[in-house]
Image: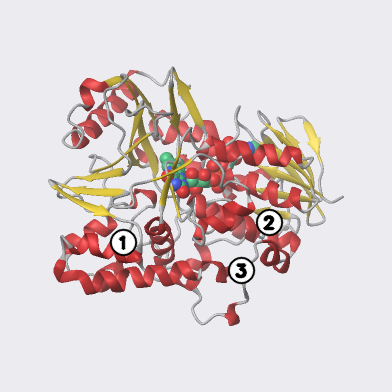
Amino acid sequence: MDSVIIIGGGLGGLECGYILAKNGFKVTVLEHDMQIGGCLQTFKRGTALFDTGFHYVGGLSEGQSLHTLFRYFDLLDLPWQQLDTDCFDEVIIGNRSFPFANGYDHFVERLSEYFPHERESLKTYVAFLKKVGDHLFDSFLPRDTTEFYSESLFAHSACQFLNETIHDPLLRKVLSGTSLKMELNADTLPLYIFAQINNSFIQSAWRLRGGGSQITDKLADSIRSLGGEVRVKTTVTKMVENSGKITQVEVNGSEMLTADWVISSVHPAHTLALVDESKFLRRIYRNRITGLKNTFGMFTANIRLKPEMMPYFNRNLFVHTSDADLWHIDTQRVESVLVSCSVPENEVKCTSNIDLLTPMYWDEVARWYGTPVGHRGEDYVAFKADKTEQCIRLVEKQLPNLREAIDRIFTSTPLSYQHYTLTTEGSAYGIRKDYNNPMGTVLTPRTPISNLLLTGQNLNLHGILGVSMTSFFTCAEILGMETIVKQLNLKK
Ligand SMILES: Cc1cc2nc3c(=O)[nH]c(=O)nc-3n(C[C@H](O)[C@H](O)[C@H](O)COP(=O)(O)OP(=O)(O)OC[C@H]3O[C@@H](n4cnc5c(N)ncnc54)[C@H](O)[C@@H]3O)c2cc1C
């Protein structure tokens, strides 16, 4: 029986574990933290259950982008809750509010009510997004079998596409307004990422009652039932290379493990740092990978609410100041906040908690790096309190009773992500892909070491959809793409 060691028990690592266990491999997943899940971890405070990262997914209805992948992973029967199809995301800019609706025509109709002069441009916009989404799985097929290879859009600018397609600057801002789920950066963001992610949410949008960790818990259970092992509190501390192959994996500084293959779902720079001197990993390659820039991190205020105070709202709010420049993010001042609430249990009409998220760069917290969690100092506490206050001030017009409904607030910064998941610079979405340099920033699963593969959000597209796609790309290096295409039931 072939064997594989997988470094990291987040979504990417567990999905690879699932695919390979299903294909008869002996799978061992090694997770550094006390719980699996990575960005999909949840934590409980009293009766409130908080998500640390994940808030919603797109494209989960039959025939849509994520459905095919989650059917394979047996994740469709989790308690998914579809968001309001008439307004799954509400974009608020200053005092004005705009709805995002599901379905291409519906999306155009709803926004045309506010921008009648842009109806035709909106049709062009969604038609393009749909085309990109329709060709999602072409990445699994030989390039010459398709006339529109959507991954080539990694070399196009998302910002330029928007400027060329939409004339009204306010509408451009609105269409950019739900994009805290990617790092909007006029100088780098590839069109592929913008189009693929936005398309999947226009298809349909879903929350998970009971938190995102159910996704990774179910994957881990499936791996175990297929004979695999998922270990927590198990940090990979070193890899030993011999004749171009990883021959040993050291965990927790002592135990040595072996396998035919090693897949790393952790940051590629972190992965390379685990490999001792190796002539296969030349300095130039190491420097290239280590020098790649990372996307922003996230500041999150997880707010536990007093009972029966805040009616549940079945949509997300993306609140921006009227002068926020969404394509040149300035995180010194809070200009944009995502507001998401948890789906209540049973017949309860009110939500028990609300999360406020705003981008935060590593620079803002780097001075506290190395200080112990919970004891980072009074200035760190004050810094977080100020950010929280700015977030609340920005959103309270939309949620007038928020202040009086607050029971307790728990906050996290990129430092928290760095601590719990060892994520480089606490980055939310991994390596920053750059349309000026797609070859250098969009990595493939292969490394110069023949049995060491990469997976996870750092490679291709981030998010649940992207990481799930990438798991198949990675496993195709072992199983062959023909097998993946057959198992996913994709049509050539
Ligand atoms: C704040 C935030 C909000 C998000 N919201 C959404 C959303 O609403 N919808 C969506 O689709 N996506 C969202 N995402 C993105 C999505 O959650 C991620 O793209 C995805 O979960 C990343 O999975 P991964 O496996 O690549 O990485 P990770 O989840 O980071 O997993 C890597 C794992 O490796 C472990 N590890 C690290 N080093 C070692 C080591 N040496 N040994 C052993 N284990 C190690 C870590 O502890 C971690 O568990 C969000 C992300 C963030 C941060």
x, y percentage for residue 351? 34, 29
Local SS, label 2: loop
In whole angstroms, how far apart are the C-alphas of marks 3 and 1?
Answer: 29 Å
Residue furthest to the right in view is 1
Could you tell whether 347 is left or right of 274 in the image? Answer: left
Judging by the rendered image, the residue that carries numbered circle 1 is: 186
Amino acid type indicated by mark 1: Ala
- Residue 356 pos. (x, y %): 32, 35
What residue is rendered at 39% in x and 46% in y?
296
Q: Front-most of 73 and 44? A: 73
Q: Quadrant of the C terminus?
A: bottom right
Q: Nearer the viewer, mark 1 or mark 2?
A: 1
Residue nearest the observer in this picture, 467 or 329? 467
Q: Which mark is residue 281?
A: 2
Spatial separation of the CA atoms under disc 1 and disc 2: 33 Å
Which residue extends farthest front? Answer: 347
Marker disc for residue 140: 3
